[in-house]
Image (tube, rainbow, N blue to C red):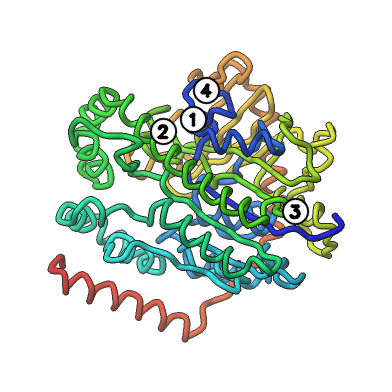
Amino acid sequence: MKTLPNILFIIIDALRVKNLSCYGYEKEVSPNIDDLATRGVLFADAYSCINTTDPSLTTIFSGRYPLSHGILGHGARVTVEEINRFNTFGIQLLPEILKSHGYTTLAVDWLGRWHKRGYDYYSGIQPRGNIYVFMRQMLSKCPKLYDLIRSQNLIQNIRGKLPQSRTKPYEDAKVVTDKAIILVNENKDKRFFLFIHYWDTHFPYIPPREYFEAKDDEVLKLFYLFTSRKFRENFADFERRIMDRKEEIIARYDGEISFVDHELRRLIDFLEKQSILENTFIILTSDHGESLVEHGIYMAHHGLYDETVHVPLIFVHPELPKNKVVRGFVQHFDILPTILDILNIKMDIEFDGKSILPLIEGNPIHSQVYAEEAYIEWKRMIRTHKWKYIYAPSEEKAICRWCGHIHGGVEELYDLENDPAETQNIIEKEPDVASELRDELEKWVKRCQQKMPKVQPPDSKEAEMYDEDRKQIEARLKSLGYI
């Protein structure tokens, strides 16, 4: 490219392709995302490498598979050891690379920790007065205290005593877009990289009334029952009630998509009016998908089925083809090498991913894709165009930490040509296919694990910081009368 473009990197959390019109959804819920797809390249077969946010974003911005960069946990379950391992590796993230090449780096997100490395401005945006968000951020460094609080249903009790607007665990798309517009306006004379992270399509699906209006609060009761451990006491009844309200749950999720879609249009219009859009490279994807009611997994993103790991991916730039749908496997770790290829930035860095540009020209880059699961249950996946094989190292690891059941099986094999919904586990019928896929999966795992550095122990200052986090959490909860 003759002139390095601005870069707008959009992640819409828990957005699955199944509910996007440009990916074949029968309902028109995403006209502006659809319009973006007509302006550029839509990748039909893009897959996440893991189904939780922390490790997925780390993969996206590092170009490495989770087993290579070392972050497998999420939220409160990211351990000090994982962070030390990641820091030991000395991985350069996308904003760090772009900053070293003259970009002003900006982010509207609140995940913090290592995610904010390399930014000139990182918003850390969060809902004011939202105790849920406060606890989630603080407890991300105190997993033992997190488990204690969950076991006593304290988060559930707090949510029940606060207005609905205070219990949505993120700021909504309007606030994110407002902040993004301010940042662009302040930096429009610079070459910028702007990362924005919309969370609205993440549970608990409470869109503005103009996008969905409920007749009663039954589904909200089910949502909040789900976040506690009480739903396990009568799981059959919970499942029945959820399936009775299946259409409403989907409508709520669609409403959140439409809300984000509208706000995205507002941002694109602003870029166009400021004559910025024509020299802006846009990347849109999600960190993972979402299982709404499929596979016995409700309003969550565990499981390695396509609802959860098949993600949207759209590239838009004047020098890329327009209105082009590209078939062929792509993974999140391919995005960073592709960006550098498009920008003609040469780096002596080893990635697990590859540039997607050859695929756009019709040359496949992957014959299969891989994914990990290490939060609610522990499984691994390999997927070809015909087969999907999912494997847990033991029955204990396969048990869902939320519902106490095993989804699908300890080993699963699906014939995707004849069973695209992944409902018939044929592991017993095709042992040779399963064995071959498992061998390929194990080879991939070994290659990635060889890159993972040894864990370094935390220093005393870091240990003191974690202890201080624990004390702050306890003091805040006591002041609110919950412990």
Question: SS class of the residue under badge 4?
Answer: loop
The residue sitting at the left extreme is 481
Earlier sequence position, callout 4 versus callout 2: 2
Residue with the mark numbered 3: 339
Earlier sequence position, callout 3 versus callout 4: 3
Q: Amino acid at mark 1?
A: Asn
User: In 3D space, how far apart are the residues under numbered discs 3 and 1 (Cα atoms)?
Assistant: 27 Å
Q: Amino acid at mark 4?
A: Glu
Badge 4: residue crowd in 10 Å (few <14, some 14–19, many ≥20): many
The residue sitting at the front extreme is 273
Residue appearing at x 87%, y 57% in the figure? 2
Residue with the mark numbered 1: 19
Earlier sequence position, callout 2 versus callout 1: 1
> Residue 439: in sight, yes or no?
no
Q: Which mark is residue 254?
A: 2
User: In 3D space, how far apart are the residues under numbered discs 3 and 4 (Cα atoms)?
Assistant: 33 Å
> Residue 349: in sight, yes or no?
yes
Question: How far across and how far down the image is residue 297, in percent?
Answer: 39, 33
